[in-house]
Image: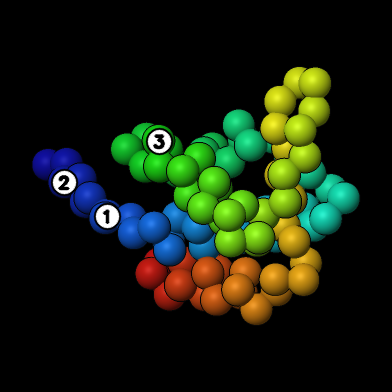
Amino acid sequence: MFIETLTMWVDNQIKGKILYKLTRLGKFNHSHTSIDNLPKGFPMDVRGRVKDMAEELKKEGILLSKPTSYGEEVSINHTMKDKVDSYIAMFLESN
């Protein structure tokens, strides 16, 4: 018998996972990744909210945006380390 457990993702957990992923990949300041890569690794039902949360992180000044001819690239603003760490902690505590 297969039992699927559904986890409710809150906004701060999504933000935390985005930042955790970018931190592990070393995407700070001048090292960018495509914003289209951010939803990868999230459950299918949450992927639609990932770009919305990335937009909120940009508004908070945590994510830096770099427009390119082939799409938008993002990186973490290293001066916001305390906020980054708090979001990552919220994500890790939820697991």
Image quadrant holding the C terminus, namely bottom left
Image quadrant holding the N terminus, namely top left
Relative horizontal placement of residue 34, taking residue 51 as reference (left or right): right
- Mark 2 and mark 3 residues within 8 Å of each other at the beta carbon: no
- Mark 1 and mark 3 residues within 8 Å of each other at the beta carbon: no
Give the structural element (helix, strand or loop) at label 2.
loop
The disc labelled 1 sits on which kind of residue? Answer: Thr
Work out whether 58 lies above or below 16. above
Give the structural element (helix, strand or loop) at label 3.
helix
Residue corresponding to mark 1: 7
The disc labelled 3 sits on which kind of residue? Answer: Gly
- In this view, which residue lies farthest toward the top? 70
- In this view, which residue lies farthest toward the right? 30
Q: CA gap, disc 2 to disc 3?
A: 24 Å
What residue do we see at 80% from left, 28% from top? Answer: 68
Residue corresponding to mark 3: 48
Dot 1 or dot 3: first in sequence order is 1
The disc labelled 2 sits on which kind of residue? Answer: Ile
Q: CA gap, disc 1 to disc 3?
A: 15 Å
Answer yes or no: is residue 25 visible.
no
Instruction: Look at discs 2 and 3 and give the one toward the viewer.
Output: 3
Give the structural element (helix, strand or loop) at label 1.
loop
What residue do we see at 34% from left, 59% from top? Answer: 10
Work out whether 48 lies above or below 63. above
* Residue 44 on image: x %, y %: 37, 35
Task: Count residues near mark 1 (Cα–Cα under 10 Å), then give few for <14, some for 14-19, many for 20+.
Answer: few
Instruction: Look at discs 2 and 1 and give the one toward the viewer.
Output: 1
The numbered mark at residue 54 is none
* Residue 88 on image: x %, y %: 55, 69
Instruction: Look at discs 1 and 3 and give the one toward the viewer.
Output: 3
Residue corresponding to mark 2: 3
* Residue 83 on image: x %, y %: 60, 73
